[in-house]
Amino acid sequence: MAMRNAYVDQFPAEAKVIKAAFWSSFLALAIGGLLGLVQALHRTDVVRFIDSADYYTVLTAHGVLLAITFTIFFLVGIFTWAVTTSLERGVVDTRFTWSWYAMMVVGTVLVGVTIFAGFLEDAPEILGAPLNADVLFTFYAPLQAHPFFYVGLVLFVVGSWLAGVDWFRTWWAWRGENPDERIPLPTFMVLTTTLFWYICTFGVALSILVFLLPWSLGIVDSVNPLLTRTLFWYFGHAVVYFWLMPAYMMWYIMLPKLSGGKLFSDPLARVVFVLFLLLSTPLGIHHQYLDPGIAEGYKFIAMTNTMFLLLPSLLTAFTVVASMEHGARQRGGEGYLGWLRALPWRDPVFTGMALAGLMFAAAGFSGMINAGMNINYLVHNTWWVVGHFHLTVGTAVALTFMAAAYWFIPQVTGKALWNRSVALGQVLLWFIGMTFMSNAMHRSGLFGMPRRTAEPQYSGFEFEPAAGTVGEINAQVALGAVILTVSLALFLLNMVLTSFNGSSDAIPDNTYAGTLSGPEDAPEILDNLKLWTAIAIVLVIFAYTLPVASIVENGGLFGPGIEGQQLTLVPDTATVLETVREVMP
Amino acid sequence: MRVSKAGLLVVAAIVIPIVVEFRTALSWFGIELSVLEGVALAVTIVLAIVVWAVWPSDGNGNAETEPTDPE
Ligand code: HEM
Ligand SMILES: [Cu+2]
């Protein structure tokens, strides 16, 4: 035990918080993933476990638990690891760390209870409204949730803000001790990501605190739906980078090391993270290409910014692959492609992350289709989009996190992984399952199969796939979903059985990749966080002032006066139609 | 073995998206493979790769090439 130098040996107090955050995220993954299977089988009419009227309760839980809870709990864990490991010092005060974690837990429980109360025959009335929140993870008006849902979200987001404060505090303390040093790369990545998280969550906080929460409490009687949508998407695109940046961080600082080499370029990595800080937020309107009430010109600006964001992703692909090649050649790999064989494919951490990166490349292609203003009209709100983001957040992020867990859980517990072969099988199964599910979803979208629909089997209407049959495509979705669920079960099994293991001496040291071209090659200005934040804010002001002003001018700050819809309570189409007419005169 | 067992598994896994997408791509050229034909194609490719992998690389029956070695 004397020689071991794992994270838990260096930072035992921090390791406990990180472990708690990881387990919170695994729990969300377990519940959310199971609901994914329920949805896939329900929609394709293979087996229907639930009543279709409860579909949106399931879908809300799946979206919130996976896209918000699972991802963010995991990333606050690795960000805390990254800051402490790269600064070689603990957080300033672990009681503060525990308190933001606790705040996020309380928020999650409140949100979760409110969503799951939607399954009850008679949801209890609290604060004069029935407890439910069938509002999907996008929660914009006219859908309305119980106030607890919004309060829970606020607690969760504020918890994440305090986590950011914790990382900044730790960095400030370090800077005091090391005034002349460059910010270590992992900390740089965490801080830039946190900065755009602050910028983008400002919009959703505004939306909740000024509009949605007062509206659900009955303090104001209406809201402007387009305004709440726009504020959501102001946050909703940047949040995808909040999920993705930790995955990128893993690819930059873990993959090169696992491949046996070094990161190709520290300066390039810094440039990439600065570009994300600048461009993550001023493009949310690309989710609203089909929204009436926003002029085409603003949509065009959003599209242009989106296309610019391809640049840092392509830089990442280049740097990471170059670093892997360098590693493979260090291990004796040769030839144009022969070096690929020298990579450590037996290692589930490596293979999981590499396959996640490969799927992200595919997601990049379908993302470019989404991002094009005109071609987006073809796929908007179809299953194509769902196929796309199961490659991004559902694989590039989720699979990277699961693979990373195989390295992190031993680091923070001091226990050896229960079974590495099962882990390798698990990441391969996720890759295979997602291939089936996502490919079929993309193809469904091309013939107009809508997303967010419990029973897309319409009478008197046939979908016309350009290739294959609807039955076959549905079977492919169901098959993919089953394989994914098996993969998920294997992941959780490995985690649970690992936690029953005793402490082990064979845990690798807590390290990350060195660099071929280090921070000394990066211009000082890259570390000027104030400058980049200021530019990011200016870009946001440019992109959003005019569209928001015109939305408020046309629809009123608090809207033309519509009532909220609670979906489970109003299965009556006439009411829904009436609402639609009120929104779109 | 010309590649490690793990490497072989990974290659087999990567064949699946290639076949799935290839089948869709072919249909744009009017060539429609049935599900069974698609599965057969995948199995054939994977088998071919397995045979290639276990085939001795220099005709010497028990040549054990380490995966990290050049061909
Ligand atoms: C076991 C694996 C999974 C399965 C079987 C699955 C299945 C599905 C299905 C069928 C839908 C579409 C429902 C519809 O359009 O009506 C869906 C939506 C969604 N999934 Fe998954 N999923 C899985 C994993 C994940 C993961 C890991 C994430 C994110 C980390 C994720 C995030 C989402 C989100 C955000 C939605 C959209 C919800 C909405 O439309 O409001 N899923 N999932
Ligand atoms: Cu987006």
Image: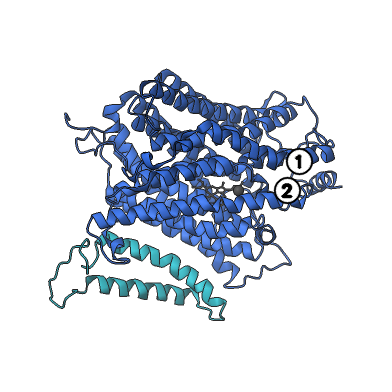
Chain colours: A blue, B cyan
Q: Which residue is mark 1?
A: A546
Counting labels gives 2
Q: Which residue is mark 2?
A: A298
Which residue appears at 73% of the width and 48% of the height?
A298
Which residue appears at 26% of the width and 59% of the height?
A342
Question: Position of A442 compared to A96: left or right?
Answer: right
Q: Label 1 marks which chain's residue? A: A
Q: Disc 2 residue type?
A: Tyr
- Packing grade of label 2 (10 A; few <14, some 14-19, many >=20) is some
Residue A472 lies in what quarter of the image?
bottom right
Which residue appears at 52% of the width and 59% of the height?
A438
Q: Tell which of A46 and A391 is nearer to you.
A: A391
State whether residue B49 is above or below residue A578.
below
Q: Disc 1 residue type?
A: Leu
Residue A345 lies in what quarter of the image?
bottom left
Residue A1: x and y in percent read: 17, 30
Residue A284 lies in what quarter of the image?
top right
Residue B9: x and y in percent read: 31, 62
- Packing grade of label 1 (10 A; few <14, some 14-19, many >=20) is some
Q: Label 2 marks which chain's residue? A: A
Residue B42: x and y in percent read: 40, 72
Mark 1 vs mark 2: tell me if same chain: yes
Secondary structure category for the residue under label 2: helix
